[in-house]
Structure formats: C-alpha cells, structure tokens
Amino acid sequence: MFRREAAMSYRTRNFFLSLSLFACFGSGLMNHPTTCQAAAPDSNEQRAAEFVERHEKVVRPLEYQTGLAWWNANVSGLDADFQAKETAQNKLDAALSDSARFRILDEIHKQPIADSLLKRQIDVLYLQYLEKQVDPELLRKMTALGNQVEKTFNTYRAQVDGKSLTDSQVRKLLKESKDPAERKKVWEASKGVGALVEADLKSLVQLRNQAARKLGFANFQVMQLHLNEQSREQVLDLFDELDSLTRKPFLALKSSVDAKLAANCGIGVDELRPWHYQDPFFQESPAIFAVSFDPIYAKADILKLCRDFYHGIGLPIDDVIARSDLYEKPGKSPHAFCTDIDRKGDVRVLANIVPNEYWMGTMLHELGHSVYSSKNIPASLPYALRYEAHILTTEGIAMLFERFSKDADWLQQMGVSVPDPKAFDEVGARILAGGPRDL
Ligand SMILES: [Zn+2]
C-alpha cells in the first residue's frame, strides 16, 4: 500500500502492472524545465504560476505536518498522536477549502495554459481543492470520524482465550490449524473489530456521501474515482471484463482448492466457511502445496535480502530502512505501508516483519513503493507533481518487486539455498497465476 495525502488504501494485490511505467521517471516528464514564468503580465499562465507558488508556500508545510502526524499516530497508536493527526488534517483542510482561493483556481483551470507542466500542476491542484469545497464543519466531522475508525482498526488485536494475538499469529494459525473449531474462534476474534467500528463507519459513509453529493457527484465512491482521474464506468467495465475472462478458470481452481481445504480439516466441501480459507481477507492463495516457502524464509534475513537486492539494481534503500518502523509493537498499525513524508526524499515504511514468505513479499512490495517516490524523482520537478504518476503505477511497481519472493532463481542469486528449486518455482508460478492449476 502507498499513502498519498489523506487518502489511504491497504495493500492491494493481483492488479496489473507495467514495467514501462518506470520509463516516466527517467524520461522527459521528470526533466522538464520548471520555469514557466515567461508569460505576459496578467495572462492565465502568470496567474497559474502565482497560484502554484502560493500553494507551495502555504500548503506544503501543512502537508508535511500532516504526513508526520499521520506517521506518528500509525506507529504509536496513542490517543495524543491521533489527536495531533486530526488537528494537522483540519489545518490542511482549512487551507484547501478556502472558497476564495478555489474561485481563482477554477477560473485559471477553465482557461487554456500552453505550458504542459504548468497545466498539469493546475489540473492536479484543482482536483485536490475541489474535494474540500464543502462546509468546513462537515470536513471536520468526517476527519474526526475517520480518525476514530482508523485508531480502532490500528490498535485492535484479536482476543482469544484471554490472550491478545498479533496479526501474524492470527495468520499463522489460520494457515496451519486443522481444527475447525479453533479456526472459527480465531477468525471471529480477528473480525471483532467490525462491531467496534460499525456505528462510526456507518456515520462516516453517510457524511462522505453527503459531501460528495454537495459537489455534484452521485456518491463518495464516484467522487474518489473522479479525483483519481478515473470513472466508475471505466472501472466497472474493466472488472466486468476480468470477471468474464476469469470466471471459468477461477471456479475450476476454487473447487480444487475447496476439496483440499475441506480434506485438511476433515470436513465436507459444503461445510467450508470463511475461516477455512487461511488468509483473513481471501487475498492470498491458500498454502496447500507440497512445497512450503516459509521454512526457507524462517532462516533468512529479510531486511538484508531487501538491502542487497535494491542496492544490486542501483536503487539503494538504506536511508528508507533507517527512517522506518519495521517490527510489531502494541498499538501500532498491524499492516504495512510506505509513505512519502515531504516529497523530498523522506520516505518511510511501516511494517511488522516476521520471518516468513508473506513478509518477504510485503517488504519487497513496500520498498518497491519507496524507490518509486520522491526519493528518486529529480528535485527539479515541481512540488505539486513530485509523487507517483498515479496510485496504479506505484502499485504496479510494488507488485513487480513483490513477485521475487516466490522465485527460486532470485533467492539463489541472493545467496539463499533452496532445497528443491524446481518444485519451489512450480508452486510460485501457480500462486502468481492466482492459485493452483492442479493439486
Ligand atoms: Zn502497495
């Protein structure tokens, strides 16, 4: 997952990627001259340049404070840090929701701008300000509720028989236990957070839809897609197409998976429930193969492998590691993300590493985001554009690197011995293809 501004999405997998996206970073886009002030006085170009300059002066420090507060709250889980995060977000929102500033921006946005780099900055800023053109009180309410929900999710730990379990302990048990009753108990405990956030989450949904409708969108989802320069139709068409292309092989695979999972627990296929599927979010292929990756990673130094690998491809990440928070602790977000704090190279990863394949893949993924960030974007690119080209491009890059954790050749080249490389690769290929072809 990669964090950008206040938006937040958990690590997504199995999405498309394209290596060619990397080309953007080394090509014309990044090397474009930043100066665009050679316009006639009072021209739209000049007004645009002035708006961008003032934005950077006023909003940039607020974005930095928000990024820092967001990081601190996710690391500690402390009430005071979540309160500081909310305060910082409110200050940032107050600047972005300034209606007089938005009117100026709207006028600039409607007029042609010849300089493509300046035009892109105005397009991006227009969307950023547009989202905040609602009643400031409504914005503050949404931030308070969102903050509360996030804190509850981050600090929640499954309670089983009076014991608090970490996310990794829940995953391990759901991967290995053959006892249906135990699986159910742990899975339900891990979902106990639902009841805690239900009321706040429902209120938040209503407020977000209210804000989106005020801005002329059908609902919050449609608005968010628009702000990310996508449309609901485009996304639904894509997923409909993927569904029609994959439904048959998916159902064939799933029936093989179901048979194996049911047999593992000594139950019938018709008795399978969510807690039999290992991954709590049904996002990972179940571990039902002859070869298990985990014993190999149990002895490996995941962080060293990451350092050596990224250094080896000319994109060292030692500075990222030094600023990161990588191991489990109470109150800390139990997931993983990479965040760019200042668009000037202060890039950090939050993780909860334990030595297994899941965390090897996750660290390659998050550090993949880190090399596709302001850390490697020339400072000559204007501030307003100095982050990933789109959330899909950074996810694509992260997923490209993540795949190596299932590649025996990669492991061997990194100096890790793999007992049966052929079997390892066969299983890896099946998982990367979305699941086992045969069992
Ligand atoms: Zn990601």
Image (spheres, grey):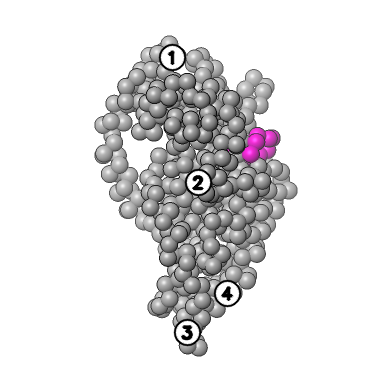
Report the residue marked by disc 3.
39
The magenta stretch spans which residues? 326-335
283 lies above or below 374: above
Residue placed under numbered mark 4 in the picture: 53
Residue most toward the right? 80
In this rendering, would 47 be left or right of 225?
Answer: right
- Quick one: quadrant of the C terminus? top left
| Neighbourhood count class around disc 2 (C-alpha, 10 Å): few under 14, some 14–19, many 20 upward | few
User: How far from the left and from the top, in percent, is residue 49?
Assistant: 52, 77
In percent of width and height, residue 71 lies at 64, 49
Q: Secondary structure at mark 2?
A: loop
Cα distance in 3D space between marks 4 and 1: 62 Å
Nearer to us of marks 3 and 4 is: 3
- Is 332 part of what is drawn in magenta? yes
Residue lying at 73% horizontally and 48% vertically, measured from the top left: 80
The first of marks 1 and 2 along the sequence is 1
Q: Label 2 near label 1: C-beta < 8 Å?
A: no
**How many angstroms separate mark 3 from mark 4 (CA)?**
15 Å
Nearer the observer, 204 or 357: 357
